[in-house]
Image (tube, rainbow, N blue to C red):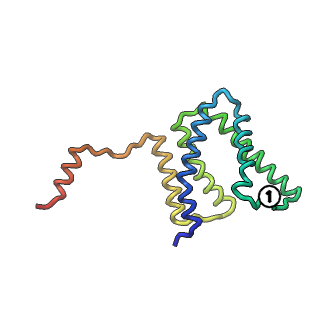
């Protein structure tokens, strides 16, 4: 049985994909703005909206050591990554960005297994295979089979028994 959290996650997936597509389009269009500025604005908006998303964050006591780790995560894993992404977006074709977007979750799953020993469920493994096949398909220019109206008519008449 699928729990409510999983259903919510599946429901938010199209929203997340749409927002990510917006980020890519904005990133490609901001050729005259330095990537560091775009990254700073995105991170600042994230920090400012955090209390709206999770109001309990305002009542959490965080010690100095934890602030150090949070700062490291924010600067190294978020700000640096975003600066590199926004530096590359205007220079990449949309198809290359799509391929890289497929690879991102697959690499996260792979490293979660390598570092944490987290095994994939069968449905997660199927998703990983779909991600890899999609990336290869885009790279190799695979196309889905196209059926002409004549083929469909021929096929449908051949399957009907009289």
Figure quadrant of residue 159: bottom left
Left or right: 86 as drawn, with respect to 140: right
Please tell me which residue is depicted at 53% across the width and 52% down the height of the picture.
Answer: 14
- Residue 98, percent from left and from top: 53, 42
Between 88 and 110, the residue placed more toward the observer is 88
The number of numbered discs placed on residues in the rendered structure image is: 1
Please tell me which residue is depicted at 43% across the width and 40% down the height of the picture.
Answer: 141
- Residue 66, percent from left and from top: 84, 57
Left or right: 15 as drawn, with respect to 42: left
**Which secondary structure, mark 1?**
helix
In the current view of this chain or complex, which residue is farthest to the bottom? Answer: 1
- Residue 128, percent from left and from top: 53, 56
Left or right: 85 as drawn, with respect to 56: left
Above/below status of 27 relative to 123: above
- Quadrant placement of the C terminus: bottom left
Between 127 and 119, the residue placed more toward the observer is 127
In the current view of this chain or complex, which residue is farthest to the left? Answer: 162
């Amino acid at each position: 049985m699928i729990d409510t959290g999983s259903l919510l996650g599946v429901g938010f997936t199209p929203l997340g994909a749409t927002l990510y597509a917006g980020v890519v389009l904005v990133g490609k269009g901001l050729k005259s703005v330095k990537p560091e500025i775009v990254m700073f604005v995105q991170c600042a908006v994230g920090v400012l909206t955090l209390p709206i998303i999770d109001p309990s964050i305002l009542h959490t006591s965080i010690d100095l050591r934890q602030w150090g780790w949070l700062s490291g995560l924010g600067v190294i894993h978020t700000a640096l990554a975003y600066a590199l992404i926004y530096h590359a977006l205007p220079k990449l074709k949309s198809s290359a960005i799509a391929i890289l977007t497929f690879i991102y979750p697959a690499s996260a799953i792979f490293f979660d297994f390598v570092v944490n020993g987290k095994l994939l469920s069968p449905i997660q493994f199927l998703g990983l295979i779909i991600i890899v096949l999609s990336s290869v398909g885009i790279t190799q220019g695979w196309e889905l089979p196209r059926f002409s109206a004549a083929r469909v008519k021929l096929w449908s008449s051949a399957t009907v028994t009289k």
